[in-house]
Image (cartoon, coloured by chain):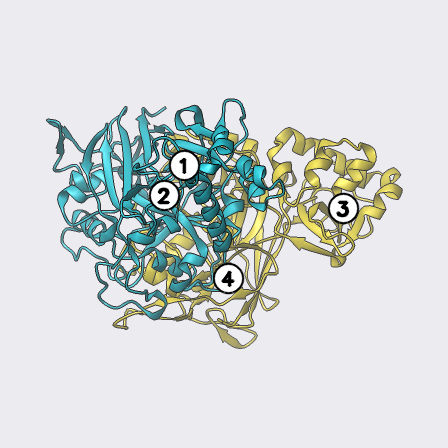
Chain colours: A cyan, B yellow
């Protein structure tokens, strides 16, 4: 463990010191070109420009000049390490301060963009508490969990073309909905707009069609993690989803953080899964520490309304990747998968308003005001922290979005 | 109606004369660069090269030099018409034969590739007969159609990263499956590998996030159609699909034709829908002739085993596009949607082996041999024809694939 800190103003002791170093894509007023940067404290470092100072033919500089992380991610784990070691050195040793400082931009002076060009987006359903809560609400007379749930990480494909970066306003979706008490469906703005507080995983290195990615190859393919809010229109979803799953109830927007935290920054966050019973089939077996100790906060209009613990998730990210490719399906650089709503065992750990308000039947109180689903003008922010490799904590990229009225 | 034919050898009177002109992406032994071509008879014309002879700065030549149809499709309907008129003239008037002929390649001398860079892939379930057949098999004691089916075109997102071009071998997928009679799931090669004979639609011009595409704007956004086989592992699908829909049962491969037939070639194929009752909600209303009279043939090892009529489909392509964007979700150039299995009202018009063999319970006979699901070594080919604008018929791109044993 190296207790090293950066010479950059304000970085030392912050949640974005040298043990974090998430990547993103930014542009400046002077230079509108989108390019890759790394976050240090409240600054972003223009990576390509700095790399070219040292080596005009730098292969890393070439990929950092592009408008997404994809080309860098496709280089693979060895180059990810080379890059991280080099960035750490540049930002740690004051010898580099003079020539590097001109390429540091204050966060409030840059525009941040979607960091990755997304291939396929898959969303899972990996929280036992979330799946149980939903089961209890929707099928009160039956076992809360469906028969397949403990045998495989249930997942489905979402819409990659509507994954938007944090800060994008969310227009309340319209759609068909029919309450059980109504004779026929009507079309109009969703009345049960919700969030799903999730963690997202980003594929760096693709795989070959027809070949499985084992749970032990997770780190060979996975570049890092993002914050993810899978906005959901529960009324649209409830009417459409049998038998082929959610479609328009989810596809209007999925927000991800501007920052992608590389797996290397999460070395100290690995933890045991809560336990899997029955033992999963061979292709889903994982080593002991395959869960992640990441704490999440859900804020509604700047007030914390829930604290879901990612460590409570039943299925691990390595299991989700292995399952995705178990049939020979390939993954590509830029593929994204979400964990599914993160809900802990306590009421104040639930990761959706559906659960926090028990389907709207038990509104929760925020500063004396009763709330259930999202109202126009609401802002939802998800924040994430994890143990850092230097003994403190690091923050993952936050995800925020404001609800605008339906058009 | 122009009864014009091409000077290209073998084109006149074929299914690929001037009233067809589908686009694809090819390369040659001499020139491995993937580029856009148009099919005429049994030849492909190298479009960029010919366009540059006339105009070295041709904007069309620039987009035809790229390795997918996306840049061309993104230009929009006016340029699609300009291009089609120009190609028609070049291939119709013998004056152009001398300078054009060197850029015609025999189909058996080129390699054909995936024609589009696919954004999101959505698969629908738009055949009343298919949905009813599946309902009767899986829920014999209930109404065959679920309550939402006649109110909206049910659909879900598939995996765009595993869409492969016609001719790609299909490795039998492995996965979890559990028969109702078994206590717990096992992992292994699918025992119920199937096809779905579908028609695919390709988005040329994208839409804006938050704005709906009305049914009347179908032709402003849709570039053309492809043949599509949505390979399906029924046993994997049956165990995984509740409650979030099909995932690994479908994601191992979806085959599409090499050729994209532009909508302009289908002008004479529009026909009335079979009828919709109840009347759909306003955002799904369409004009009278919004169905397509396309005949499909399903061949198992070169023997026709079914003839599904696309004209029998309940939901129209314009309704599927309007539904996809009804919640404000945007579409992008290269988005692909499948119609869902095409099944007509007669047993010999069913577009899946699930239906042809009634879930395996009633094997069908092919030249004296009983068959139900796909066996290793089987080849399935889908062929499509439609009325052409010159009074004859045109062929759409065929889709073929051979089943290889699981690895």
Q: Which residue is mark 2?
A: A20
Mark 1 residue element: strand
* Same-subunit check for callouts 1 and 3: no
* Disc 1 target residue: A39
Residue drawn 22% across the image and 49% down it: A130
Q: Earlier in the sequence, mark 1 or mark 2?
A: 2
Disc 4/disc 3 C-alpha distance (Å): 38 Å
In the rendered structure, are the residues bearing label 1 and label 2 in contact, judged by CB atoms less than 8 Å apart?
Answer: yes
Q: Which residue is mark 3?
A: B45
Left or right of A247? Residue B350 is right
Q: Chain of mark 4?
A: B
> Which chain letter goes with mark 1?
A
In terms of depth relative to the viewer, which is nearer, A313 or B146? Answer: A313
Give how far across and how far down residue B334 sits, in percent: 55, 41
Of the two numbered discs 1 and 4 in the rendering, the one whose residue sits closer to the viewer: 1
Determine the CA span between mark 2 and mark 4.
Answer: 62 Å
Mark 4 element type: helix
Residue at 71%, 45% (x, y): give it: B38
Q: Residues within 10 Å of mark 4 (few under 14, many from 20)?
A: some
User: Between marks 2 and 3, how big is the CA–CA gap?
Assistant: 54 Å
Q: Secondary structure at mark 2?
A: loop
The residue that label 4 is drawn on is: B348
Numbered disc total: 4
Looking at the image, is B231 positioned above or below residue A372? below
Q: Chain of mark 3?
A: B
Q: Are marks 4 and 3 in contact (CB under 8 Å)?
A: no
Determine the residue positioned at 26% across, 51% down: A293
Residue B221 lies, in percent from the top left, at 54, 34
Cα–Cα gap, marks 1 and 3: 50 Å
């Amino acid at each position: 463990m190296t207790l090293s800190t950066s010479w950059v103003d304000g970085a030392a002791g912050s949640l974005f010191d040298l043990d974090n170093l998430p990547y993103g894509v930014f542009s400046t007023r002077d230079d509108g070109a989108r390019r890759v940067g790394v976050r240090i404290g409240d600054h972003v470092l223009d990576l390509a420009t700095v790399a070219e100072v040292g080596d005009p033919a730098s292969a890393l500089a070439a990929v950092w000049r592009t408008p997404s992380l994809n080309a860098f991610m496709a280089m693979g784990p060895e180059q990810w390490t080379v890059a991280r070691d080099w960035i750490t050195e540049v930002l740690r040793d004051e010898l580099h301060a003079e020539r590097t400082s001109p390429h540091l931009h204050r966060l409030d002076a840059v525009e941040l963009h979607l960091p990755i060009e997304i291939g396929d987006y898959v969303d899972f359903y990996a929280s036992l508490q979330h799946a149980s809560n939903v089961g209890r609400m929707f099928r009160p007379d039956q076992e809360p969990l469906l028969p397949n749930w403990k045998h495989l990480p249930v997942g489905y494909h979402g819409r990659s073309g509507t994954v938007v970066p944090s800060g994008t306003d969310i227009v309340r979706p319209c759609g068909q909905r029919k309450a059980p008490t109504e004779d026929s469906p009507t079309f109009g703005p969703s009345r049960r707009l919700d969030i799903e507080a999730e963690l997202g995983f980003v594929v760096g290195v693709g795989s070959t069609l027809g070949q499985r990615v084992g749970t032990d190859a997770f780190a060979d393919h996975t570049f890092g993690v993002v914050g993810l809010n899978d906005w959901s229109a529960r009324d649209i979803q409830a009417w459409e989803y049998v038998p082929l799953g959610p479609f328009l109830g989810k596809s209007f927007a999925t927000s991800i953080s501007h920052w992608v935290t590389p797996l290397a920054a999460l070395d100290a966050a690995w933890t045991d899964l809560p336990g899997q019973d029955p033992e999963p089939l061979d292709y889903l077996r994982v080593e002991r520490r395959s869960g992640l100790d990441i704490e999440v906060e859900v804020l509604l209009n700047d007030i914390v309304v829930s604290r879901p613990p990612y460590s409570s998730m039943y299925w691990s990210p390595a299991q989700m990747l292995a399952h995705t490719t178990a049939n020979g399906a390939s993954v590509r650089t830029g593929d994204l998968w979400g964990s599914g709503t993160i809900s802990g065992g306590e009421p104040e750990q639930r990761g959706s308003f559906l659960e926090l308000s028990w389907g709207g039947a038990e509104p929760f109180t925020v500063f004396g005001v009763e709330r259930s689903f999202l109202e126009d003008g609401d802002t939802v922010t998800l924040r994430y922290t994890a143990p850092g490799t230097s003994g403190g904590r690091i923050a993952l990229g936050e995800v925020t979005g404001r609800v605008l009225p339906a058009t």
